[in-house]
Image: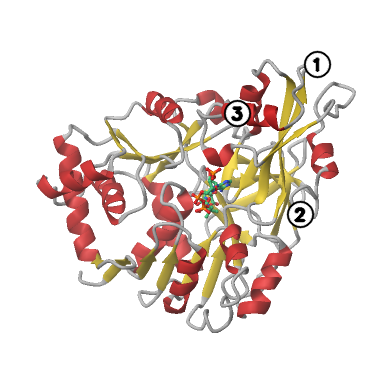
């Protein structure tokens, strides 16, 4: 197959045939390290052609891919490795390149069934203890086939890819769909706004998080001319405001197609390819996927807000070695409880209205407040803290820490903030609060529960001032 696959700016274009060869080398290298079918392989690598080859090599061997955000600290990685118990950890691009160079290719593919595990994707949780969302080959295959059709991918497409490949969006949504249609991918190492804009005129499809689009909007050149070949702009991983949706349409003539998904269930709903893409909504359940909204008593409701639940071949079997968390996330009749609050209209169009948990989505990355609060609360100058997401023009939501200092410690100004920031070195930088606000006390209800909604409402404009 000499069809172009990954076009790396300033580098060569890797064809599908070359990727096939490289992934066979990656499989050979892993096998020489003792990796066998069913084994986990933890991967923390910068985005590269080799990293894609490694992913495909892992699947080729029947092993399980465990991608980690490159921002995770050694302490975080240590935790994931202890939990996943991998046969190998790949974190050095140089070793990978050398490994590919000297290994014997493994031709063919170790056969796997639809129930077999293909990936573990770690997500944090409301307790601060991350969980590995298990995804099977059946999940990956069904979602990719569905998306290829739903978004009308063709081999003539050129996908602009500036997402990281350690999450389902960049890896499983973008690359799988591209590979199924054997289209070409402009493979940018990271999202640089200027580079993305410069690549756009060659692209027919772009997938991104809302921050990518809001950053493009800051450049005048992001207009109908730059999008002259574009047939589809797709957004996901975080809600796109109706305002941004309309602004992009005015500027480029393209109505962004917003879709909704999560690591545990891949893609769940999508605005239609042909049909109304309504700003502020995430569209309809994808073919083969069922979505329902239930009230607190578990009764299905329409035109009313409730908990979004999903069922279908896209939903993974649960959390790695966490039967407790797995059963908590399932209804007794087997639906996956997303944790998102939404409303279905009579036609089945879903609008998301919030979250049942206080999870924050910053620039398309999930952040769980408890993880940060536990560290801040342990500081001797802190009585207590509350971490919330506040509206942010670039990130959608920005992690913000409200801190009650111990009276008389003098801990109210920049000194305490700097000290607290210094205590967070064991967690990834993207989780660090963008602002610390010292307050005398936290708002509470009669039961003593901190009212985060009140903090969010009161400080709603903190980042727009
Ligand atoms: C980077 N930083 C962030 C951040 N990303 N802070 C908060 N939120 C984020 N998302 C911080 C870094 O810690 C650093 O801080 C500074 O910003 C510069 O780092 P950078 O790496 O140069 O940032 P940048 O390249 O600008 O990255 C921003 C971004 C990136 C929005 C382009 O985060 C991104 O690509 N996000 C997409 C994530 C994604 O793919 N999500 C999909 C999840 S799958 P300091 O302090 O060190 O200077 C999923 C399911 C689904 O959700 O439905 O898709």
Does residue 347 appear in the picture of this structure? Answer: yes
Front tag of 2 and 3: 2
Front tag of 3 and 1: 1
Q: CA distance from mark 3 to mark 1?
A: 27 Å
Residue drawn at x 14%, y 47% is 106
Residue drawn at x 62%, y 68% is 218
Which residue is under mark 1? 408
- Sequence order check, earlier mark of 3 and 1: 3
- Sequence order check, earlier mark of 1 and 2: 1
Observer-nearest of 341 and 232: 232
x and y, in percent, of residue 204 in the image: 46, 76
- 374 to 40, vertically: above or below: above
Front tag of 1 and 2: 1
- Sequence order check, earlier mark of 2 and 3: 3
Note whether ligand 1 is within 8 Å of mark 1.
no
Determine whether the residue tagged by mark 1 lies in a helix, strand or loop. Answer: loop
x and y, in percent, of residue 312 in the image: 52, 49
In the displayed structure image, the side of residue 373 where residue 22 appears, left or right: left
Which residue is under mark 2? 464
x and y, in percent, of residue 29 in the image: 16, 42
Determine whether the residue tagged by mark 2 lies in a helix, strand or loop. Answer: loop
Which residue is under mark 3? 371
Residue drawn at x 31%, y 68% is 10
């Amino acid at each position: 197959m000499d069809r172009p696959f990954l076009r790396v700016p300033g580098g060569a274009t890797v064809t599908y045939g070359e990727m096939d060869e490289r992934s066979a080398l990656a499989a050979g290298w892993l096998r020489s390290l003792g990796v066998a079918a069913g084994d986990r392989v933890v991967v923390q690598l910068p985005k590269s052609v080799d990293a894609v080859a490694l992913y495909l090599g892992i699947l080729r061997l029947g092993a399980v891919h465990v991608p980690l955000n490159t921002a995770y600290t050694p302490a975080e990685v240590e935790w994931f490795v202890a939990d996943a118990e991998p046969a190998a950890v790949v974190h050095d691009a140089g070793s990978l390149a050398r490994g590919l160079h000297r290994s014997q290719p493994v031709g063919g593919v170790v056969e796997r069934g639809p129930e077999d595990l293909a990936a573990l994707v770690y997500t944090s949780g409301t307790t601060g203890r991350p969980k590995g969302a298990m995804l099977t080959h059946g999940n990956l295959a069904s979602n990719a086939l569905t998306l290829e059709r739903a978004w009308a991918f063709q081999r003539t497409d050129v996908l602009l890819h500036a997402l990281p490949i350690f999450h389902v969006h960049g890896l499983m949504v973008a690359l799988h769909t591209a590979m199924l249609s054997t289209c070409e991918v402009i493979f940018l190492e990271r999202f640089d706004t200027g580079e993305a804009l410069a690549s756009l005129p060659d692209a027919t499809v772009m997938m991104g998080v809302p921050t990518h689009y809001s950053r493009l909007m800051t450049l005048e050149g992001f207009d109908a001319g730059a999008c002259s070949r574009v047939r589809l702009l797709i957004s996901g991983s975080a809600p796109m405001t109706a305002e941004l949706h309309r602004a992009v349409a005015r500027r480029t003539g393209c109505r962004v197609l917003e879709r909704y998904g999560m690591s545990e269930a891949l893609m769940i709903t999508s605005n239609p390819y042909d049909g109304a893409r309504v700003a502020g909504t995430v569209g309809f359940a994808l073919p083969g996927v069922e979505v329902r909204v239930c009230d607190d008593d578990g009764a299905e409701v329409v035109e009313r807000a409730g908990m979004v639940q999903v069922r279908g071949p896209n939903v993974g079997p649960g959390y790695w070695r966490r039967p407790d968390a797995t059963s908590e996330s399932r209804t007794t009749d087997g639906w996956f409880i997303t944790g998102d609050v939404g409303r279905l209209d009579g036609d089945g169009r879903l609008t998301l209205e919030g979250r049942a948990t206080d999870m924050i989505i910053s620039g398309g990355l999930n952040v769980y407040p408890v993880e940060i609060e536990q560290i801040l609360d342990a500081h001797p100058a802190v009585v207590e803290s509350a971490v919330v997401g506040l509206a942010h023009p670039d990130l959608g939501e920005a992690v913000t820490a409200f801190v009650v200092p111990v009276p008389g410690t003098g801990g109210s100004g920049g000194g305490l903030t700097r000290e607290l920031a210094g205590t967070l070195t064991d967690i990834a930088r993207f989780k660090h609060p963008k602002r610390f606000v010292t307050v005398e006390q936290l708002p509470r209800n009669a039961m003593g529960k901190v009212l985060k909604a009140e903090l969010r409402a009161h400080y709603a404009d903190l980042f727009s001032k």
